[in-house]
Image: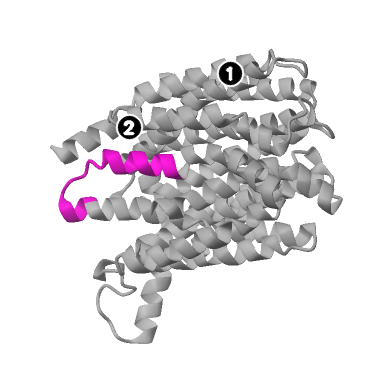
Amino acid sequence: MLLGSVLNPINSTIIAVALVPIGRALGAPASQTAWLVSALYLATSLGQPVVGRLIDVFGPRRLFLLGTGLVGVAGVAGALAPNLGVLIGARVLLGFGTCAGYPAAMALVRSEAGRTGRDSPGGVLTALAVANQTIAVVGPLLGGLLIAVGGWRATFALNVPLAVAAVLLGLLRLPKADPAHSADPAGATADSTRHGSLAARLDLPGMGLFAAMLVSLLLFLMNLHLRDWYLLALSAAAGTAFAIRELRAATPFIDLRVLGGNTPLLATYGRALVAYVVAYSFLYGFTQWTEESFGLTPFHAGLAQTPMFLLAIGVSIVSGRSAGVRGKLLLGAAGQIVACLVILTLGGDSPLWTLLLVALVFGVPQGLNNLALQNSVYFQADPERTASSAGLLRTFAYIGSMIASSATAASFGQHADTGGLHRLAWVMLGAGVLYLLLTLFDRTLGRAAGAGTRASA
């Protein structure tokens, strides 16, 4: 469960220090290598809730094995890629392949809670938070090590042994689908009945409209420009059709009636979006600046973020002992704001310890926000839709990451200079302040902890 959850965040962040070496090796400018980031986010944002819904219907085992197997294929394709186009295709496969790990883990935690009657898995959720997001900050360091030893292709080849291990563990340990996940709970034997029931439960038209809405929106966010207004219009049209479809469907892909009435969960999704604007602007923008303007190698750029990794792990473990989320979110918001203010003081001649200080400060929100957001979804979501709700959390997070990617490209232009870093820091600061306000004025906070307490009483 933990290994499967690691695959997505590791691949999301390990590319940060590989963009410059890949561009040099393949003769591609930064505007083209940015698609290596966007391709994975596009695939993941779309795939997470879709795969999550499939897990809700079929159970985690089959989707987990299929997804992690696809990660291995993508690793081979990326390691042998002759050009940037094939490399981008490998990143798309990685995006879809890594979609199953996190929703499957959340579904397994929920099913075990139902089986044992103990719905207070604080330790398991903390371990999952560390594995699925907090550990992501080790990506730049790991990427730097791999590039130093085997070149940028090693960052793709890493997926092969990880996928093999995940598939073997999944075959040995994951429970087989129970009757609750059969395609036809009524036990009908006619193929047409089974297929009709399956199609109704999956809501394929709803999935298609959701995909059209999200792809159009993310393509617009990848390169913000008024000339691409038609993408925003297309997204709005698809979104309207999606809402109409979901409100009429007997078993909707995303139950908008339930979701619309679940204010705490909606607020959690909103916080996730702005939190990841800050987090991924830092991971990509700050890393590129340390390489291009501060003069660090990919390995040393990753090494400079080690304080963030270590502190984030410690903060997650310590704070995971408490069920409350408001305090974690407020302290995480404060940490983001302080880190952004420190970035505004940096320059090409700043001492190295100031870079380490920024990374250290960012370790606090990295450890707190991920855990609090994940725990909120676990207790706020409909138990029957735990996997798809967890997948939707990732979708909002990656929309935030796409905004961060666009902000980074717009701030830097052709070169990651100090002026661009400061422009990006102001964007991050604005998102951090919004995150703080969304937390301060959210009166629904505390229900997540309360739900967990009641369930375990």
Where is residue 61? Give x, y as percent.
Answer: 37, 66
Closer to us: 41 or 148: 148
Q: Is residue 228 visible?
A: no
User: On the image, which quarter does residue 410 sit in?
Assistant: top right
Camera-nearest label, 1 or 2: 1
- Magenta region: which residues? 113-131
Mark sitting on residue 357: 1
315 with respect to 291 (left or right):
left
Residue for badge 2? 320
Specify few, some or many for label 1: CA neighbours under 10 Å numbering under 14, 14-19, or 20 or more: some
Tag 2: amino acid: Gly
Mark positioned earlier in the residue sequence (1 or 2): 2
Quadrant in which the N terminus is drawn: bottom left
Residue visible at 39% across and 63% down in the picture: 169
C-alpha span from label 1 to label 2: 24 Å
Residue visible at 38% across and 38% down in the picture: 265
Q: In the displayed image of the protein, which residue is found farthest to the front?
A: 149
Mark sitting on residue 403: none
Q: Is residue 394 above or below residue 162?
A: above
Q: In the displayed image of the protein, which residue is found farthest to the left?
A: 457
Where is residue 118? Give x, y as percent.
Answer: 17, 46
Q: Is residue 295 visible?
A: yes
Residue visible at 38% across and 64% down in the picture: 170
394 with respect to 117 (left or right):
right
Q: Is residue 241 above or below residue 328?
A: below
